[in-house]
C-alpha cells in the first residue's frame, strides 16, 4: 500500500521494544480471545451479586475515574472475577491541542489500580481549546491530522506505559481534503506508533453502506496482525433526502451482515477478543449474553478445530 506520508521517518519509540508482540495485547489481566460484553450500569448489581458467566467485560473508562468512590469499588470487585478492558471515550486523540494532562493522569491511576487487559480509545476528536464536546467527531485523513493523532497516541502510550488500541470510527461524511483512505490512515498510525487496532466491524459496515465502499476490501487493507480486539454492535437505518443512511446507535441486536463481516474479519486477524456493544435502550442482561453466545459461535466457527488453541 502506498501511503502519502510513508516518506516521513517514524519517530523513534523506545517504548515499542518493551511492548508485547504486535496483535496480541494481554496485559496483567489478560482478555481472552472469546466473546465479552460491555458492562452497563443497569447490570452492575447482577455482576456484583451473581457473577454471570461471560468471558470478559469492557467498561467505559470515564465512568470509573473517581478514585475511591463506590463505582470504583464496584469495578475493583468485578475485576477480581473477570478480565476487564478499559474503553475510553474522552481522551480526544485527534485534538490538535494535545492531550489533557489531568485526564491522562486520572486514566493512568485507574489503569494502575484495575490492571485492564486491554486499553482502547477512538480515532476521533472531542476537545477543542478546552471545550469538551459531547460527541466523537471525525478526523480528516490528511498528513497533518495523522501527525496530530500519532503524537497523541505516543503520548498516551508513554503515560500509561503500555500499548493502546485505537478504534476505527463510523462516519457519515467524507472530507474533500482527505489525502488517504481510512485504512491507510489507520495503518500508518499503527506503523508509526506501535499501537494496535480495535476493529469495530459494525462501524465498517455502517461507513461502507453510507459511502458505498466494499467492506471486505477495507478489512483486507488493514494490518491484520495489529488487530487486538473486535467490536460488534447494532445500528439503525433511516432515510435522508431519499438516501438510505445507517446510524451507529448501539441500540439493537447485531445485524446479520455485521455477523458475516465479523467472520470475515476473524478469518484475517485470527482469534481475538470480540465485544458486543449495546449502549442505548440497554436490554436485559440475558439478551446481551445471548448476543455474546452468538459472537462466541462465530469465533469458534472461523477456524478449523486445530487452529483454535488461542480461542477461549
Ligand atoms: Fe465500537
Image: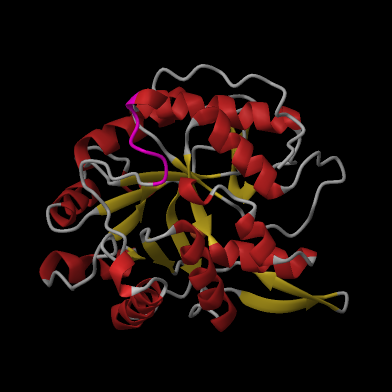
**Residue 132 lies in the magenta-colored region:** no
Residues in magenta? 18-23
Q: Main secondary structure of the magenta part?
A: loop
Rendered view: 278 above or below 56:
below
The reply, left or right, for residue 269 in relation to residue 148 is left
Residue 262 in view in this figure: yes
Q: Residue at x 58, y 51 (%)?
A: 168
The percent coordinates of residue 139 (x first, y second) are 70, 42
Q: Is residue 266 left or right of residue 289?
A: right
Q: Write the residue at 23% across / 33% down.
A: 112
**What percent of the width, then of the height, locates residue 37?**
34, 66
Q: Residue at x 32, y 31 (%)?
A: 108
Above or below, 252 relative to 143: below
Placement of 142 over or under 52, stated as above or below = above
In front: 224, or 204? 224
Residue 201 appears left or right of 209? left
Q: Quadrant of residue 239?
A: bottom right
Task: Point out the residue furthest to the front here.
Answer: 306
Can you say which quadrant of the picture contains the N terminus? top right
Q: Is residue 250 visible?
A: no
| Image location of residue 209, percent across then percent down | 73, 70
Query: Which quadrant holds the C terminus?
Result: bottom left
Amino acid at each position: 500500500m502506498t501511503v502519502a506520508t510513508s516518506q516521513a521517518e517514524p519517530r523513534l519509540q523506545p517504548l515499542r521494544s518493551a511492548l508485547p508482540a504486535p496483535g496480541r495485547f494481554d496485559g496483567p489481566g489478560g482478555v481472552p480471545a472469546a466473546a465479552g460484553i460491555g458492562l452497563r450500569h443497569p447490570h452492575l448489581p447482577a455482576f456484583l451479586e451473581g457473577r454471570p458467566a461471560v468471558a470478559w467485560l469492557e467498561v467505559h473508562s470515564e465512568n470509573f475515574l473517581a478514585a475511591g468512590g463506590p463505582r470504583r469499588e464496584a469495578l475493583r470487585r468485578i475485576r477480581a472475577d473477570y478480565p476487564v478492558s478499559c474503553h475510553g471515550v474522552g481522551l480526544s486523540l485527534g485534538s490538535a491541542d494535545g492531550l489533557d494532562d489531568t485526564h491522562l493522569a486520572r486514566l493512568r491511576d485507574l489503569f494502575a489500580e484495575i490492571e485492564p487487559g486491554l486499553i482502547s480509545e477512538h480515532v476521533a476528536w472531542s476537545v477543542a481549546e478546552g471545550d469538551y464536546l459531547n460527541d466523537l467527531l471525525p478526523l480528516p485523513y490528511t498528513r497533518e491530522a495523522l501527525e496530530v493523532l500519532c503524537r497523541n497516541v505516543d503520548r498516551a502510550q508513554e503515560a500509561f506505559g503500555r500499548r493502546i488500541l485505537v478504534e476505527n470510527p463510523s462516519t457519515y461524511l467524507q472530507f474533500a481534503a482527505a489525502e488517504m483512505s481510512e485504512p491507510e490512515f489507520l495503518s500508518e498510525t499503527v506503523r508509526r506508533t506501535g499501537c494496535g487496532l480495535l476493529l469495530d466491524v459494525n462501524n465498517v459496515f455502517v461507513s461502507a453502506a453510507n459511502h458505498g465502499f466494499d467492506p471486505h476490501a477495507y478489512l483486507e487493507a488493514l494490518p491484520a496482525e495489529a488487530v487486538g480486539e473486535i467490536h460488534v454492535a447494532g445500528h439503525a437505518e433511516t432515510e435522508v433526502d431519499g438516501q438510505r443512511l445507517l446510524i451507529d446507535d448501539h441500540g439493537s441486536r447485531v445485524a446479520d451482515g455485521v455477523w458475516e463481516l465479523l467472520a470475515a474479519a476473524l478469518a484475517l486477524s485470527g482469534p481475538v477478543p470480540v465485544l458486543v456493544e449495546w449502549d442505548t435502550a440497554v436490554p436485559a442482561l440475558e439478551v446481551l449474553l445471548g448476543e455474546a453466545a452468538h459472537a462466541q459461535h462465530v469465533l469458534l466457527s472461523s477456524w478449523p478445530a486445530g487452529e483454535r488453541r488461542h480461542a477461549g
